[in-house]
Image: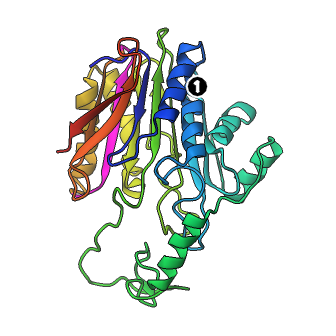
């Protein structure tokens, strides 16, 4: 498999947003940079809310608020801009790029990130919609199930908070709640004919997450990683687990050592699978010659991973898939 210019990561059963994909591809075709392509593709997905897991109006937290995580990485300079727990600002990928281009920092979080965005000229507005309010209301009526608390009182499996800490219980391991229905991410890897590489991600995180939770998407080496001397990768899935293994960084380093992109992706997934056999996750990889691959962990809600590729040969988005293992 070889892609000359642009790869977009999606996750089955994501409702593929062809407008977002085409936006990024058109940007490259018209002479835009790989950073422009990544930003424009993610921004379109944020504006159109993709499948509800990207942009405003989705994945309300325990307070009913939608917050956004995003990052963008320049594989030439190794500069990164990222935001997490971003409130009131719809264009998270734009703010992430502003962090990269207008500060010496890498990651801004929470209310301070939102204030930075407003100072940079981004418009503050309510990220809630009728849909997100409805999701939150139903969750409250269902005794706040599911949630991501443990070792607290009252019993989080039966009750809403407020919670207080309690000694660790000797019960069996609680099943992970993250699956294709609760979370997804848009990840983009872009490569131009001069060998310039960039990568980026955007998501509204995990539905019913504890306020302040940050997943893998805005974390360098976890959500995405790019190095124009080796390649790039982007991941999606259970960010709380995946960020502990930096799968995107691992995959790029494997490609630097000459590993085929498909095998690099599979190795990155296998590293996590060794510790969490049933985790929900997938990754896509592309090297500097334009070859690409993907891999996913087989789970109850994930048997096959779908992603899209556009290059000079197809000149149009092509849907690809890999079987999970």
List the single residue furthest toward the top: 194
Whether residue 21 sits left or right of residue 257 in the image: it is right
Relative image position of residue 282 (x, y in whole percent): 32, 44
In the rendered structure, does residue 280 fall within the stretch colored magenta?
Answer: yes
Q: Is residue 76 visible?
A: no
Whether residue 27 sits left or right of residue 17 in the image: it is right
Question: Which quadrant is the C terminus positioned in?
Answer: top left
Colouring of the image: rainbow
In the rendered structure, does residue 239 fall within the stretch colored magenta?
Answer: no
Q: Which residue is mark 1?
A: 35
Q: Is residue 186 visible?
A: yes
Q: Nearer the viewer, residue 209 or 182?
A: 182
Query: Which quarter of the figure has residue 31?
Result: top right
With respect to residue 168, does 51 lie above or below? above
Is disc 1 placed on a helix, strand or loop?
helix
Q: How many marks?
A: 1
Question: Which quadrant is the N terminus positioned in?
Answer: top left
Query: Which quarter of the figure has residue 26?
Result: top right
Relative image position of residue 285 (x, y in whole percent): 35, 30
With respect to residue 197, does 215 lie above or below? below
User: Which residue occupies 37% across, 31% down?
Assistant: 308
User: Which residue occupies 45% across, 88% down?
Assistant: 159
Q: What segment is highlighted magenta in the picture?
A: 278-289
Query: Which quarter of the figure has residue 287?
Result: top left
User: Which residue occupies 53% across, 62% down?
Assistant: 213
List the single residue furthest toward the bottom: 154
Relative image position of residue 267 (x, y in whole percent): 24, 37
User: Which residue occupies 42% across, 83% down?
Assistant: 156
Mark 1 surroundings within 10 Å by alpha-carbon count, few (fewer than 14), some (14 through 19), many (20 or more): many
């Amino acid at each position: 498999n070889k892609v000359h210019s642009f790869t977009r990561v999606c996750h089955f059963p994501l409702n593929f947003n062809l407008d977002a994909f085409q936006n990024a591809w058109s940007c490259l075709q018209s002479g835009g940079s790989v950073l422009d392509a990544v930003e424009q593709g993610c921004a379109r997905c944020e504006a159109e809310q993709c499948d509800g897991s990207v942009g405003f109006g989705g994945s309300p937290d325990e307070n009913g608020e939608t917050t956004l995580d995003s990052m963008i990485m320049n594989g030439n300079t190794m500069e990164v801009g990222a935001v997490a727990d971003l409130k009131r600002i719809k264009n998270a990928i734009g703010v992430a790029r502003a962090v990269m281009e207008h500060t010496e920092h890498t990651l801004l979080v929470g209310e301070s990130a939102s204030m930075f965005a407003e100072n940079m000229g981004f418009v503050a507005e309510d990220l809630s919609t009728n849909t997100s309010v409805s999701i939150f209301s139903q969750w409250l009526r269902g005794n706040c199930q599911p949630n991501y608390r443990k070792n607290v009182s009252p019993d989080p499996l039966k009750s809403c908070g407020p919670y207080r800490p309690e000694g660790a219980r000797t019960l069996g391991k609680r099943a992970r709640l993250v699956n294709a229905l609760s979370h997804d991410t848009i990840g983009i890897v872009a490569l131009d004919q001069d060998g310039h590489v960039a990568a980026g991600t955007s998501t509204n995180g995990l539905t019913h997450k504890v306020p302040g939770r940050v997943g893998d998407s805005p974390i360098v080496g976890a959500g995405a990683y790019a190095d124009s001397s080796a390649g790039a990768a982007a991941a999606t899935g259970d960010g709380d687990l995946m960020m502990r293994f930096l799968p995107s960084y691992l995959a790029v380093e494997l490609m630097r050592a000459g590993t085929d992109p498909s095998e690099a992706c599979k190795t990155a997934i296998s590293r996590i699978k060794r510790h969490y056999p049933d985790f929900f996750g997938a990754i896509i990889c592309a090297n500097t010659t334009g070859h690409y691959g993907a891999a996913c962990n087989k789970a109850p809600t994930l048997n096959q991973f779908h992603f899209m590729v556009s290059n000079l040969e197809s000149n149009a988005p092509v849907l690809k898939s890999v079987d999970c293992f």
